[in-house]
Image: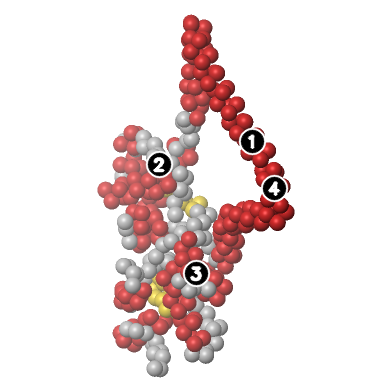
Amino acid sequence: MNSWFRYYHAALDHPKVGKLTDAQFRTWVGVLCVACRGDGELPPIVDLAFSLRLPPKDAARRIEALVAAGLVDRDGETLRPHNWDLRQFKSDGSTERVKRFRAKQGSVAETADEAGKGLEDQTERNVSVTADETARDAENDRVRNVPATAEETGPDSDSDSDTDSSSSARATRAPTSDDDELRAKLREAAKGRIRKTCVNVKPIRKLMAQGCDLERDILPFIAETFPNLSGPLGTWGGKWPGPDILVFSQERRAAEARGESPGQTARRERIFVDVRSPEWARACEVDRRVKGVRSGPDPCMHGPDGKSVGWYFLAATLALDDVLTAKLGLKVAAE
C-alpha cells in the first residue's frame, strides 16, 4: 500500500474534472485517496462511504456521478479510478537508486585507497577480519558444546530438552496455523462474500473469548446472513457483524436454557426493514440502544426480493418498541 499517489496539474484544465460540482470534486479526490490504500481498487460502498464521511446513499449517488463523468471505471462489482494503473505507474522505486549510489560510493572508496589511504583501510579490514573470526569461533564453540552438554546430562535430560524444543516450536507456529484454519472456515461459511483483505481474525477470537461458540454461533450466523450482503465484507473489525453475533449467541444460549430447539435460523428470527421505509430510522435507533453502539447498521443487505436494500433486524429487538411491533406486525413473546 502506497502512502502517496500522483496528482497531475493537468486536472486543472481537464473538462471531465471542470464539469464536476464542488461536492463531486471533493468526493473524487477522496476516492483517489481511498484507491491509493487499496492499490487502485475501491472497497464496498459502505466502507467507501465511511472513508468519505458520507451516508451510504449519498456516497453511492456521488460515485454514480463520477462513473457517468468517466472518472471512475466499473468492472462488475469492482470500482477503480479511471486509468489508475496508467497514471500511478510503479517505476520510481528507490531500490535501483540505492544500488547505484552504493556502487558509486564503492568506486570512490577504491580511488581513495589508491591515493594513499591503504594503511587506514588495512586497519579497518583487520578489525573486520578479527570480528568475523571471533564470531565464527563463538559459533563453533556453541555448536561443539551442544552435543557435549547433552551427553553429560544423560538421556533423560536429552529427551526433556527435545520435548521442550518441540513444544516451543509448536507454540511459535500454532498461531499462524490456527489463524489460517480459522480464516478457511470463515471464508467457507461466507461463501466467498469476504474480501481478500479480510485476514485479521482477532475480532473473531475476541468473540470466542466472550463466549461465542465458533461452530454453533459464529459460523451459522455467517452462513445465514452473508448471502444477503450487497457486497463482500471488508473487515471483521467493523461495527458488524461482531455485535450481532454476540446477540445471536446470547439468544441461542437462552433458548437452550429454556429447553427450546436451537434449530432456529438467523433469518427466521429477523425482520427485513427497507432503508426507504418510514420504520428505518426508528428500527436503527432501537437496534443501537440494545447493542450499546454509537450508530445503527448500514443498509448493506438485500431484501427477500433481491433488489431492495436495508437490514435484517432481530425480531426480538424490534419487538421491544411498541410502535414497530404494531407497524411490522411482530408477535410479542409471552413472559
The answer to whether mark 2 and mark 3 are in CB contact below 8 A is no
Q: Residue 47 placed where, x, y %?
A: 40, 58
Q: Quadrant of the C terminus?
A: bottom left
Horizontal placement of 39 versus 324: left or right?
Answer: right
Calculate the distance from the C-alpha at mark 1 to the C-alpha at mark 4: 16 Å
Calculate the distance from the C-alpha at mark 2 to the C-alpha at mark 3: 34 Å
Q: Residue at x 32, y 58 (%)?
A: 54
Q: Residue at x 58, y 60 (%)?
A: 178
**Of the image marks 4 and 2, the number of the one nearer the N terminus:** 2
Is disc 4 placed on a helix, strand or loop? helix
Is disc 3 placed on a helix, strand or loop? helix
Q: Report which residue position mark 3 lands on.
A: 208
**Amino acid on which disc 4 is placed:** Glu
Q: Nearer the viewer, residue 157 or 73?
A: 157
Horizontal placement of 55 versus 117: left or right?
Answer: left
Q: Report which residue position mark 2 lands on.
A: 3
The answer to whether mark 1 and mark 2 are in CB contact below 8 A is no
**Of the image marks 2 and 3, the number of the one nearer the N terminus:** 2
Image depth: mark 3 or mark 4 in front:
4
Q: Report which residue position mark 1 lands on.
A: 141
> Disc count in the image?
4
Q: Report which residue position mark 4 lands on.
A: 152
Q: Is residue 205 above or below residue 106?
A: below
**Of the image marks 1 and 4, the number of the one nearer the N terminus:** 1
Q: Residue 43 placed where, x, y %?
A: 44, 54
Q: Residue at x 62, y 30 (%)?
A: 137
**Of the image marks 3 and 1, the number of the one nearer the N terminus:** 1
Calculate the distance from the C-alpha at mark 4 to the C-alpha at mark 2: 57 Å
**Of the image marks 1 and 2, the number of the one nearer the N terminus:** 2
